[in-house]
Amino acid sequence: MLANNPYGTLYLGSTFDLGRRISEHKLKSVPGFTARYSVDRLVWYEVHETLETALLRERQIQKWKRDW
């Protein structure tokens, strides 16, 4: 989970290489949502055994209310 500042914009995603992906966000090397809104601060991560479980967890988190 990435954010641009406290109580700001949030972004959820999955990757096999967290360090590389965070670097891409910080350098804004991939155009899109995170580059447009400067979402580049890692605020939470979880490790999963399979991509399937990671995607299921991502969908679960996306359904949460923001106040949580």
Image: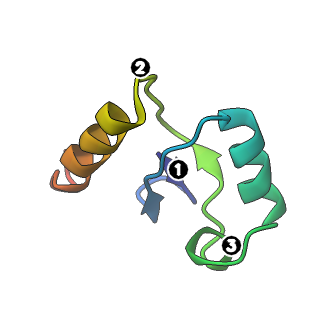
Residue 36 picture quarter: bottom right
**Would you say 37 lies left or right of 9 here?**
right
Which disc is residue 36 wearing? none
Where does label 3 land, which residue?
35
- Which quadrant would the C terminus be assigned to in this image? top left
Q: Amino acid at mark 2?
A: Glu
Mark 3 residue crowding within 10 angstroms, few (<14) / some (14–19) / many (20+): some
Q: CA distance from mark 2 to mark 1?
A: 21 Å
**Residue at the (44%, 59%) spot, across then down:** 10
For the residue pair 49 and 24, the one nearer the viewer reads as: 49
Disc 1 marks which amino acid?
Leu
Q: Of callouts 2 and 3, which one flags the residue occurring earlier in the amino acid sequence?
A: 3
Q: Nearer the viewer, mark 2 or mark 1?
A: 2
Residue pointed to by mark 1: 2
Which residue is drawn at the image coordinates 33% and 37% (left, top)?
52
Q: Are marks 2 and 3 in contact (CB under 8 Å)?
A: no
Instruction: Out of 8 and 51, give the one closest to the viewer.
Output: 51
Q: In what element is the residue under mark 3? A: helix
| Mark seen at residue 49 | 2
Report crowding for label 1: few under 14, some 14 to 19, many 20 or more residues within 10 A (C-alpha).
many
Image: 22 above or below 36: above
Label 2 crowd (10 A; few <14 / some 14-19 / many >=20): few
Marks 3 and 1, Cα distance to the nearest angstrom? 12 Å
Q: Amino acid at mark 3?
A: Ala
Q: Residue 26: where, in percent of width, then height?
A: 77, 55
Q: Toward the viewer: 8 or 34?
A: 34
Compared with 47, 53 (above or below) is: below
Compare marks 2 and 1 and give the one earlier in the sequence. Answer: 1
Residue 27 placement: quadrant: bottom right
Question: What residue sits 46% from the left and 45% below the top?
Answer: 1
